[in-house]
Image (cartoon, coloured by chain):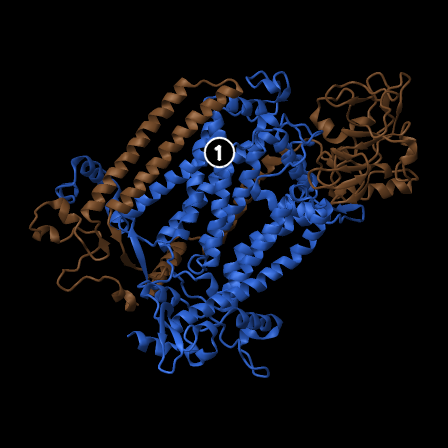
Chain colours: A brown, B blue
Amino acid sequence: MTDNNHDIEQPDDRVPKRVVGTPSPAASTTLLGAKETARTAEAPGVNLQDEKTAKKGEKIAALCFTITLLSGIAFIASYVAFQVGDVESTEISNLALGASLTLALLSLASGLVVWVRMIMPKYKLVQERHLMASDGETRSYVGETFLQGAAESGITKRPLLRRTLLAAAAPLGLAPLVLLRDLGPSYSDFPEKLRHTVWGEKTKDGKNRRLVVEGTGAPIRAADFNSPGGILSVVPEGYEHDLNALAKAVLILIKFRPEELKSGTNLNWTHDGIVAYSKICTHVGCPAALYEQSTHHILCPCHQSTFDAADGAKVVFGPAARPLPQLPITVDNEGYLVATGDFAVPVGPSFWERGDAEAEVREKGGHA
Amino acid sequence: MSHSDASGPADVPKAIAGPSSYLDDRLGAGNFLKRNLRKVFPDHWSFLLGEIALYSFIVLLLTGTFLTFFFKPSMEHVIYDGSYDGLKGVGMSAAYASALEISFDVRGGLLMRQMHHWAALLFVAGMMVHALRVFFTGAYRKPRELNWVIGVLMLTLALLEGLTGYSLPDDLLSGAGLRITEGVAISLPLVGTWITFFLFGGEYPGEDVISRFYSLHILLIPGILLALISAHMILMWVQKHTQMPGKGRTNNNVVGAPFYPAFMAKAGAYFMFTFGVIALLGTFGQINPIWLFGPYTPADISAGSQPDYYMGFLEGALRMMPAWEINIWGFTLPLSVLIPALVPMGIIMTGLALYPFVEQWVTGDRREHHVADRPRNNPHRTSIGVSAITFYGLLWILGANDEISWTFHISLNWTTYIGRVLIFVAPVVAYIVTYRLCLGLQRSDAAVIGHGVESGVIKRLPHGEYIEVHVPPSEDIEAHMRGKEAIPVIAGADTEPGGIPPKGLRGPIGKLKAKMSKAYGGEKIPLDDGHGHHAHGDGEHTAVGAGEDRSLTH
């Protein structure tokens, strides 16, 4: 297995063999006397740098380390000198701290590399590898010892001990899992929660909930929302900042010319060409926030599911499998848009217990 | 009994001799150091790739610890009153407010945040290219299969670590990622709603997920990663690094530089380089400017939302999937989410983890391997690898199909339709092309060994023909090429039809195994197949065969 080793510099017969890593025997015979030199003697696989290169390397490395020293000081100085607190000053502080840190690190790295390449010897050392496996004798000894220990411990011939120990471990092992129960909410009818939104709840005084503009919270007078192609992002009154409610209840409100609406849209749930769809994409729940007026396409920017808003928000492209649910709306006696009830089907991404809610609604003679 | 009075050479400086004797008396560290101080590490540029990941991880720990001092993992609603004017008075979570505070009110905070993010990108990138190096050189072969599996585990955990990390600032972009995570989790059959409600402590988004992700991100996952990294390093140390084939390098030795002082200093330098480059990126490369995105609300999103690149392949898979959904007995299987979320990741990670074992099963090779393969010398493995890269790369690119569509003015729909076709076709094409390339490269090796290399010297033969004199390749190059070894084939795999194959190769699975073994293994292009004898038909190598070459030059 050492067939090829003679390709590499091997100890010459005139030089006594020595183990790599031990002091060179040359130390005792050197005429120069300096021990430092003796340790760095040329040896098999160790080619020293010539002194000129090493000297040059020392200078360059020292220069690098000095730059690191100065940059390190500059970093500390920058920390003290540059305050933060607004965008401009943060920019300056970031630049000063980052640049000095970068310079310090890169210069240190360069110095180390110069040290290795110009001062340290060039190495081509050889070490033997050995099979990872232990020899047969060791293996059988370990096997024997293992069996002996097992026998001495009594675990092999005392089944009562063994079985009760195993039985004892089971509940203790389960305990941490049981503890995780309260990670979830106390109720367990999760799917039910997913089927309802706050649009189904009347306001405190028993009225239909108003649609309000996201951001301003202003209610929407149907008569004012009158230019066809207009679009609004809408949230339920009273829940403007409730993220849990918004995650299911946010709407996209679009004004059509009545003749533009097709059969997919439930006209009874519209008001004067104004249609409200859930803004939560039925794919994985991103807000389907983009609208192309000329084609009436609602596009979800996450995975490009595209819905035809004029035709019941049916899917025309992309990975979403279901239309965006439509919300039944009308106006209250002051002319503001309100929801007359909840979505007929669950909004948002599909889940196991959802089933074909659209088909169920249709079976009951309703409109999904 | 004390050895301290009989310690090393008399001229070791006292400052070192004292503490070393103290430690050796108590730990016996001398024995370990005697064996390991001059441990030999082989050299090749590609062996440095994994180190990028290692050092990035250290930078992640350092910068991450700093960030924890200021970050508040809470979804409590607060009104922002920090120094970023653009968001003054805006309601947001305490997490987002504290992430803004780190950016604008803590000196060095923005730098640490940006370095942390860049280091995370580099960490995963380092792991990926390192894994590719190990794969294509067959460095995962026995005895290193377990270390390979540890590596695959670490890569998977790193993706999870990234996901939990970029969800923490609770800005609009991080929330979009969280929403998609929820949409995917809830699509799982049977357990989806349970998992989601338990993860979020109720309905999405709830008020728990940030603090839960936080403890996963800063404690649990990095703890496991740290343990796995240690195991990875220890195994590498014990098994010694593989080496590239070359002069004097055999399966039974390791040739290179000693740990102390050369490798140690090089590793230190490399750490500083990695650290320095991350600092450079953190300084000049703005990353995740959360203040521009605003606080998260499930009602809003910005177009062009993208995850960090290492999640891009999942994003692409989600975008490309047709809208399949099955409703059966009142239950829903959202295949348009399930398939892209689970299948590509499953194929890639499971494939990676199982590859060493499948290869062993196919080749029947149970020997230890310490000399790395050149990728061309195992053409099927290399083709499988390139095929997988193509599959992954396509998914990754399609994760930005909106950007592609925007930049190149291609219809968005067509980027998707083309992607749906390419995802099946491109890996096959990549396989075939790579296989051919590998054989071509093997042929060129055989030509170098057989004919020598062009010397640039033109010679006129007595009958007037001009030839270029070929000289034998240098010893180093020849040794590198001769590191090639035929890939083992299971004994009996080439039993003639009608013959009786050995026991393990009967039955349908056995027959498949024999077939695969024959295709995968063997010597496709032998290095010394006597090309010289038909050199006349060999194009550019003109009239001179190998034997003649040598006679001309010697």
Task: Point out residue B127 in the picture as x, y percentages from the top left corner.
Answer: 48, 47
Q: What residue is at 61 percent from the left and 20 percent from the top?
A: B87
Q: In the rendered image of this protein, does residue B305 appear above or below residue A70?
A: below
Q: Chain of mark 1?
A: B
Q: What residue is at 19 percent from the left and 51 percent from the top?
A: A22
Q: In the rendered image of this protein, does residue A92 appear above or below residue B379?
A: above
Task: Point out residue A212 in the picture as x, y percentages from the top left corner.
Answer: 79, 21
Residue at the front extreme, as displayed: B464
Q: Secondary structure at mark 1?
A: helix
Q: How many marks?
A: 1
Task: Point out residue B469 in the picture as x, y percentages from the top left corner.
Answer: 36, 72
Residue A132, quarter of picture: bottom left
Q: Which residue is mark 1?
A: B116
Three-letter amino acid code of the residue under disc 1: His
Horizontal side, residue B344 vs residue A147: left or right: right
Of residue B524 and residue A22, the one placed in the foreground of this image is B524
**Residue A67 in view of the camera:** yes
Horizontal side, residue B66 vs residue B246: left or right: right
